[in-house]
Image (cartoon, rainbow, N blue to C red):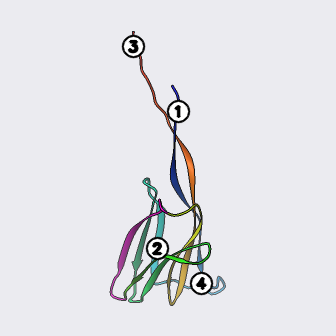
Protein backbone atom coordinates (compact mmCIF):
# COMPACT_ATOMS: atom_id res chain seq x y z
CA UNK A 1 0.00 0.00 0.00
CA UNK A 2 1.81 3.15 -1.22
CA UNK A 3 0.50 6.71 -0.86
CA UNK A 4 0.00 8.56 -4.14
CA UNK A 5 1.47 12.07 -4.16
CA UNK A 6 -0.07 14.90 -6.14
CA UNK A 7 0.31 18.67 -6.13
CA UNK A 8 -2.58 21.03 -5.64
CA UNK A 9 -2.66 24.81 -5.35
CA UNK A 10 -3.58 25.80 -1.83
CA UNK A 11 -4.68 29.28 -0.86
CA UNK A 12 -4.85 30.85 2.54
CA UNK A 13 -6.15 34.22 3.63
CA UNK A 14 -3.62 34.90 6.35
CA UNK A 15 -4.76 38.21 7.76
CA UNK A 16 -7.39 40.84 7.35
CA UNK A 17 -7.43 44.47 8.34
CA UNK A 18 -9.71 47.40 7.75
CA UNK A 19 -7.82 50.57 6.92
CA UNK A 20 -8.89 53.77 8.58
CA UNK A 21 -7.82 55.80 11.58
CA UNK A 22 -8.49 53.67 14.70
CA UNK A 23 -8.88 56.77 16.92
CA UNK A 24 -11.94 57.86 14.95
CA UNK A 25 -13.95 54.69 14.33
CA UNK A 26 -15.89 54.87 11.10
CA UNK A 27 -18.33 52.37 9.70
CA UNK A 28 -18.01 51.57 6.02
CA UNK A 29 -21.19 51.46 3.95
CA UNK A 30 -20.21 48.00 2.71
CA UNK A 31 -19.18 44.71 4.22
CA UNK A 32 -17.03 42.12 2.49
CA UNK A 33 -16.00 38.55 3.08
CA UNK A 34 -13.40 36.42 1.35
CA UNK A 35 -12.47 32.82 1.94
CA UNK A 36 -10.93 29.86 0.16
CA UNK A 37 -13.33 27.14 -1.02
CA UNK A 38 -12.70 23.39 -0.90
CA UNK A 39 -11.84 23.41 -4.62
CA UNK A 40 -9.16 26.10 -4.07
CA UNK A 41 -10.99 29.14 -5.34
CA UNK A 42 -11.34 32.48 -3.59
CA UNK A 43 -14.98 33.32 -2.87
CA UNK A 44 -15.58 37.08 -2.51
CA UNK A 45 -18.90 38.59 -1.43
CA UNK A 46 -19.69 42.29 -1.00
CA UNK A 47 -22.90 43.66 0.55
CA UNK A 48 -23.51 47.42 0.33
CA UNK A 49 -25.81 49.53 2.53
CA UNK A 50 -25.45 52.81 0.58
CA UNK A 51 -25.18 53.90 -3.03
CA UNK A 52 -21.41 54.23 -3.25
CA UNK A 53 -19.18 52.61 -5.88
CA UNK A 54 -16.91 49.86 -4.55
CA UNK A 55 -13.83 48.49 -6.29
CA UNK A 56 -12.52 44.90 -5.87
CA UNK A 57 -8.84 44.46 -6.79
CA UNK A 58 -6.46 41.46 -6.62
CA UNK A 59 -2.76 42.38 -6.92
CA UNK A 60 0.47 40.43 -6.91
CA UNK A 61 3.52 41.26 -4.79
CA UNK A 62 4.65 43.81 -7.42
CA UNK A 63 1.25 45.56 -7.17
CA UNK A 64 0.27 44.51 -10.69
CA UNK A 65 -3.52 44.24 -10.96
CA UNK A 66 -4.55 40.66 -11.77
CA UNK A 67 -8.31 41.10 -11.27
CA UNK A 68 -10.48 44.18 -10.94
CA UNK A 69 -14.23 44.73 -10.77
CA UNK A 70 -16.08 47.97 -10.14
CA UNK A 71 -19.39 47.56 -8.30
CA UNK A 72 -21.68 50.39 -9.40
CA UNK A 73 -23.68 52.70 -7.13
CA UNK A 74 -26.96 50.91 -7.85
CA UNK A 75 -25.65 47.36 -7.21
CA UNK A 76 -26.15 46.33 -3.59
CA UNK A 77 -24.64 42.81 -3.79
CA UNK A 78 -21.69 41.27 -5.60
CA UNK A 79 -20.22 37.77 -5.40
CA UNK A 80 -17.53 36.02 -7.43
CA UNK A 81 -15.26 32.96 -7.28
CA UNK A 82 -11.70 33.49 -8.49
CA UNK A 83 -9.74 30.47 -9.66
CA UNK A 84 -6.19 30.69 -8.30
CA UNK A 85 -4.83 27.49 -9.87
CA UNK A 86 -3.01 29.48 -12.56
CA UNK A 87 -1.36 31.90 -10.13
CA UNK A 88 2.31 31.47 -9.34
CA UNK A 89 3.22 30.63 -5.75
CA UNK A 90 3.62 33.80 -3.73
CA UNK A 91 1.94 36.61 -1.85
CA UNK A 92 -1.10 38.49 -3.15
CA UNK A 93 -3.31 41.28 -1.85
CA UNK A 94 -7.09 41.51 -2.12
CA UNK A 95 -8.50 45.01 -1.60
CA UNK A 96 -12.17 45.99 -1.46
CA UNK A 97 -12.41 49.79 -1.36
CA UNK A 98 -14.68 52.79 -1.67
CA UNK A 99 -14.16 56.50 -1.10
CA UNK A 100 -14.85 55.84 2.63
CA UNK A 101 -12.00 53.38 3.17
CA UNK A 102 -10.93 49.85 2.33
CA UNK A 103 -10.69 46.28 3.53
CA UNK A 104 -7.38 44.58 2.69
CA UNK A 105 -6.74 40.84 2.95
CA UNK A 106 -3.37 39.16 2.42
CA UNK A 107 -3.33 35.97 0.38
CA UNK A 108 -0.58 33.36 0.18
CA UNK A 109 -0.71 30.85 -2.69
CA UNK A 110 1.53 27.80 -2.50
CA UNK A 111 1.75 24.36 -4.01
CA UNK A 112 1.63 21.76 -1.31
CA UNK A 113 1.99 18.01 -1.69
CA UNK A 114 -1.21 16.22 -0.77
CA UNK A 115 -1.29 12.57 0.17
CA UNK A 116 -4.05 10.46 -1.27
CA UNK A 117 -4.33 7.20 0.57
CA UNK A 118 -5.20 4.00 -1.25
CA UNK A 119 -6.81 1.46 1.03
CA UNK A 120 -7.19 -2.22 0.29
CA UNK A 121 -9.53 -4.48 2.19
CA UNK A 122 -8.96 -8.22 1.97
CA UNK A 123 -11.31 -10.90 3.27
CA UNK A 124 -10.44 -14.58 3.66
Q: Which mark is residue 25?
A: 4
CA distance for labels 1 and 4? 52 Å
Q: Which residue is mark 3?
A: 123
Mark 1 to mark 2: distance in Å? 40 Å
Which numbered marker is on residue 32? 2
Q: The magenta stretch spans which residues?
A: 73-86
Task: Give x and y (percent) for residue 6.
Answer: 51, 43
Number of residues whose C-alpha sits closer than 10 Å to that of mark 1, classed few (under 14), some (14–19) or many (20 or more)? few
The structure residue drawn at horizontal position 45% and vertical position 80%, both measured from the top left corner, is: 30
The residue positioned farthest toward the top in the image shown: 124
Q: Nearer the viewer, residue 33 or 27?
A: 33
Residue 2 on the magenta span: no
Q: Name, please, the residue furthest toward the right.
A: 23
- Seen at 37% across and 89% down, the residue is 73
Mark nearer the N terminus (1 vs 4):
1
Q: Residue at x 64, y 85 (%)?
A: 21
In the picture, measured across the screen, residue 73 lies left or right of residue 23, that is left
In front here: 112 or 52? 112
Indicate which disc, 3 or 4, sits on the residue closer to the N terminus: 4
Q: Nearer the viewer, mark 1 or mark 2?
A: 1
Q: Earlier in the sequence, mark 2 or mark 4?
A: 4
Q: Is residue 83 magenta?
A: yes
**Horizontal relation, residue 11 to residue 123: left or right:** right
Circle 1 sits on which residue?
3
| Distance from Cα at disc 3 to Cα at disc 2 | 53 Å
Disc with the residue nearer the chain's start (1 vs 3)? 1
Which is nearer the N-term, disc 1 or disc 2?
A: 1
Marks 1 and 3 sit apart, C-alpha to C-alpha, by 22 Å
Amino acid sequence: MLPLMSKVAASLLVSASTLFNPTTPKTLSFDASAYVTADHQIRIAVQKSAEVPVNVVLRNKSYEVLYQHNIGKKEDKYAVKLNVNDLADGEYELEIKSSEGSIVKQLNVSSLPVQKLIRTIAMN
